[in-house]
């Protein structure tokens, strides 16, 4: 009777002829070389700073900043420290990135669909928009929009009034805004509506898989976004009013102001990036087999329903990866705000390092800020991409 063979793997012999052993050796050598290079750079930098009596470290963040920032979503004054000033710059950068991503996605999707329109005029106008905006450098576009808003628009007394309560002048764009103690409750109701919509969409999907009945998700979602925040505010009993801007003297009071710098930055980022997003959307839609259109049309669906229910869900699997790159680009391109005077993280750090001389620390702060934001966007988009990916059986 033969003895059964052992299932335990044979021990690997350390031999230079083994490709695995050589691979590990080369990786260790490469890692040691990188570590040595990093150690040399850090040691050499610290030595040069100490020889020249230049202070290093991040202790300056606790000192008083002593300079004002033109725009801030959080409370800030010159008496605050540098850490607070850098936080203001980071919040301003995130503000531009979030608004730019949302607006560029909406505009780019519309233009991308328009490029596939059967109407010759719409298709050509969309193509001209894409070709022109993609081939003009973003910095030039920012200068153009800033010049239009700050130089070509009239003063406050002759401000343009495209809509009731909206004024466009060389001081920026003035719009009505909601004021009062109920703002927190209103935003809380809005967040609650989003959570309810997410849960309801999952329920509607499972219901459709079981019964085949389509739930009117879009109409119900729009109704929830309008009704639920208002209901939460009414229950809270807090005050809420519409603050309308008005001209008093040589400037406007009330409402909310979009400065010329902020408006030019948002318009430039959205117009430039939407041209690239339009091509991403167009290529994603064209990647879906034409038979899907024909099959959906044979079921009696309208073209808008075919696009929304059949084509776009399949096209998203092609659209999401390059769309992630465009979201990262719009975030990093916001650093050009310093060219038109908008106080983003780059502008605030420049002022900080000019006052403190902490150039290396300032550059490290900028790199860490953009790296953190970019990685966060990548993680979210990769998660969403895996969520909508086709599951093979």
Image (cartoon, grey):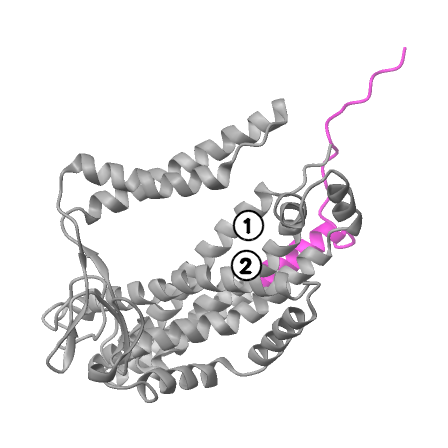
Name which quarter of the figure residue 9 lies in.
Answer: top right
Q: In the rendering, which numbered label is found on residue 42?
A: none
Q: In the rendering, which numbered label is found on residue 382?
A: 1
Name which quarter of the figure residue 170 lies in.
Answer: bottom left
User: 160 above or below 20?
Assistant: below
* Separation (CA) of disc 1 from disc 2: 8 Å
Q: Which residues are magenta?
A: 1-30
Q: Which residue is mark 2?
A: 324
Image location of residue 26, percent across then percent down: 65, 60
Query: Which residue is pictured at 15% across the width and 79% down the height?
Result: 251
Image location of residue 47, percent across then percent down: 32, 78
- Mark sitting earlier along the chain (1/2): 2
From this viewpoint, is residue 274 visible? yes
Query: Which residue is pictured at 24% across the width and 45% down the height?
Result: 186
Q: Locate residue 349 relative to residue 1 in the image: left or right.
A: left
Which of the pair 186/336 is nearer the observer? 186
Q: Main secondary structure of the magenta part?
A: loop
Which of the pair 27/104 is nearer the observer? 104
């Amino acid at each position: 009777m033969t003895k059964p063979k052992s299932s335990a793997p044979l021990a690997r012999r350390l031999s230079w002829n083994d490709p695995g052993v050589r691979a590990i050796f080369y990786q260790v050598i490469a890692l040691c070389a990188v570590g040595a290079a990093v150690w040399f750079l850090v040691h050499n930098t610290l030595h040069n700073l100490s020889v020249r009596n230049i202070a290093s470290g991040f202790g300056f963040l606790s000192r008083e900043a002593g300079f004002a920032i033109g725009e801030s979503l959080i409370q800030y004054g010159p008496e605050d420290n540098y850490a607070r000033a850098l936080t203001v710059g980071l919040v301003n950068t995130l503000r531009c990135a979030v608004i730019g991503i949302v607006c560029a996605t909406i505009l780019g999707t519309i233009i991308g669909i328009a490029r596939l329109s059967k109407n010759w005029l719409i298709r050509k106008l969309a193509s001209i928009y894409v070709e022109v905006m993609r081939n003009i450098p973003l910095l030039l576009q920012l200068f153009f929009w800033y010049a239009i808003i700050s130089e070509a628009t009239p003063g406050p007394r002759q401000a343009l009034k495209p809509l009731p309560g909206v004024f466009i002048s060389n001081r920026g764009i003035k719009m009505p805004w909601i004021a009062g103690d109920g703002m927190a409750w209103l935003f809380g109701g809005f967040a609650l509506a989003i959570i309810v919509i997410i849960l309801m969409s999952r329920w509607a999907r499972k219901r459709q898989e079981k019964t085949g009945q389509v739930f009117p998700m879009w109409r119900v979602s729009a109704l929830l976004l309008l009704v639920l925040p208002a209901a939460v505010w009414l229950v809270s009993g807090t005050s809420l009013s519409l603050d309308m801007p008005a001209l008093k003297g040589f400037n406007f009071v009330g409402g909310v102001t979009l400065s010329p710098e902020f408006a030019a930055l948002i318009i430039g980022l959205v117009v430039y990036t939407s041209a690239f997003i339009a091509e991403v959307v167009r290529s994603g839609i064209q990647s879906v087999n034409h038979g899907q259109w024909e099959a959906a049309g044979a079921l009696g669906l309208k073209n808008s329903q075919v696009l929304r229910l059949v084509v776009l869900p399949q096209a998203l699997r092609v659209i999401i990866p390059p769309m992630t790159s465009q979201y990262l680009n719009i975030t990093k391109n916001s650093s050009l705000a310093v060219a038109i005077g908008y106080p983003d993280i780059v502008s605030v750090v420049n002022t900080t390092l000019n006052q403190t001389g902490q150039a290396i620390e300032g550059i490290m702060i900028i790199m860490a800020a953009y790296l953190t934001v970019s990685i966060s966007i990548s993680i979210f988009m990769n998660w969403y991409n895996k969520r909508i990916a086709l599951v093979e059986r």
